[in-house]
Amino acid sequence: MIILTDKILENVIKKRPLHSYKGTYGRIVVIGGNPNYGGAVIMNALASVYGGAGLVTVATDPSNFTALHAHLPEAMVTDYHDTTQLQILIKNADVVLLGSGLGEDDTAYHVLQDTLAAVTLNQTLIIDGSALSLIALHHFPLPNTHVILTPHQMEWQRLSQIKIDDQSLERNQSALQQLFPDAVLVLKQYHTQIYHQQQVMSLTIGGPHQATGGMGDTLAGIIASFVAQFHSAKLVDCVGAAVYTHSAIADELSITQYVTLPTQISMALPIFMKKHAN
Ligand SMILES: NC(=O)C1=CN([C@@H]2O[C@H](COP(=O)(O)OP(=O)(O)OC[C@H]3O[C@@H](n4cnc5c(N)ncnc54)[C@H](OP(=O)(O)O)[C@@H]3O)[C@@H](O)[C@H]2O)[C@@H](O)CC1
Ligand SMILES: Nc1ncnc2c1ncn2[C@@H]1O[C@H](COP(=O)(O)OP(=O)(O)O)[C@@H](O)[C@H]1O
Ligand SMILES: [Mg+2]
């Protein structure tokens, strides 16, 4: 098992080439946010934009448009009910982040189905929140692309059938091999673990000051932005660096704060990344 340290950032966070533009840093489509959980996609998008992604579009319920723009004018929006538009967006994306705040109703089911059908080989699909629960419930196969799964322990229980108390490293590794052999698994908990093929990385920073709704939505957005822009690093290292960054910022904030809010972590990303870019 590899313990994540700030060394992982050296492999991933790079100074920007002068001859570059927004397209160089990746196109992300965030898909989720029903009328009750609009905050989830706003937090995905805040983390993606502040994490440095070039272009971020959010496909969500129209009731979330105004709130999203009020928080983040840098993001574009589209109605996730518009299947044709969704397919065009996905086709042009480098990274698709699916499921935060999607819910589990009929609309969610159809958006999930359309997205899984539209992603292609060279893209990266990050699957979070409700999309994980829906995939577990309906046994949707994963598409043939680079997949990153970001479950908390209950979502992983639903996917793997391993009860939270029985989620040992060996059992998790074996379930991943059996169910989703090519995927990267980010199993979120106190001391999050990242599984990929035979490799396991473990986080030993972070703490209960992070236990606020939206913390995982923010992590998913950071992962999306790192994968979208840091092309010279391996996918699993981008994930490791994002997981480390998320908790390192939270720990810095926790020196003076009792709780560390997800949106504060996103706001702190540009300064943290500047410090660690090489
Ligand atoms: N502002 C927004 O819009 C927000 C929107 N959100 C969106 O909401 C959607 C639903 O996501 P969800 O995680 O809230 O609900 P669900 O998947 O049912 O899991 C909860 C169940 O699992 C159990 N549980 C056990 N261990 C656990 C663990 N380690 N971590 C967490 N739970 C654990 C837990 O046990 P209990 O707390 O009851 O003891 C409970 O029974 C999803 O799309 C998400 O993106 C949220 O991000 C919040 C902010
Ligand atoms: N006690 C804790 N110590 C460290 N990290 C925590 C703790 N509680 C929660 N977290 C982190 O917060 C995030 C929670 O993710 P998730 O449950 O998906 O949140 P949400 O869906 O509300 O955004 C994960 O990254 C998890 O590791
Ligand atoms: Mg979550």
Image (cartoon, helix red, strand yellow):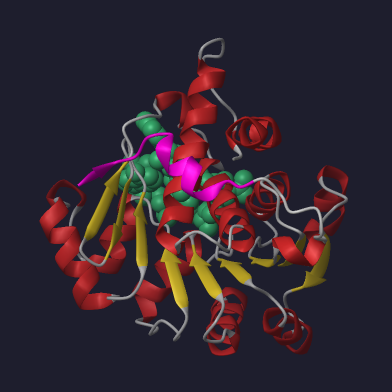
Q: Nearer the viewer, residue 89 or 112?
A: 89
Observer able to see residue 207: yes
Asked where in the image residue 30 lies, by quadrant, the reply is bottom right
* x and y, in percent, of residue 77 in the image: 82, 65
Left or right: residue 86 versus residue 175 is right
Instruction: For the C terminus, give its image quadrant.
Output: top right
Q: What residue is at 63 percent from the left and 65 percent from the top?
A: 32
| Residue extending farthest top | 256
Please, is residue 126 above or below residue 37 in the view?
below
* x and y, in percent, of residue 186 in the image: 37, 55
Q: Nearer the viewer, residue 138 or 175?
A: 175
Observer able to see residue 104: no
* x and y, in percent, of residue 273 in the image: 63, 37
Please, is residue 206 above or below residue 98 in the view?
above
- In the image, the segment drawn in magenta is 1-14
Q: What residue is at 42 percent from the left and 54 percent from the top?
A: 237
Q: Quadrant of ligand 2?
A: top left
* x and y, in percent, of residue 220 in the image: 54, 53
Left or right: residue 30 versus residue 202 is right
Please, is residue 2 above or below residue 138 in the view?
above
Label total for image: 0
Q: What residue is at 51 percent from the left and 38 percent from the top?
A: 245
Q: What residue is at 60 percent from the left and 36 percent from the top?
A: 262
Verify whether residue 5 appears in magenta: yes
Verify whether residue 150 appears in magenta: no
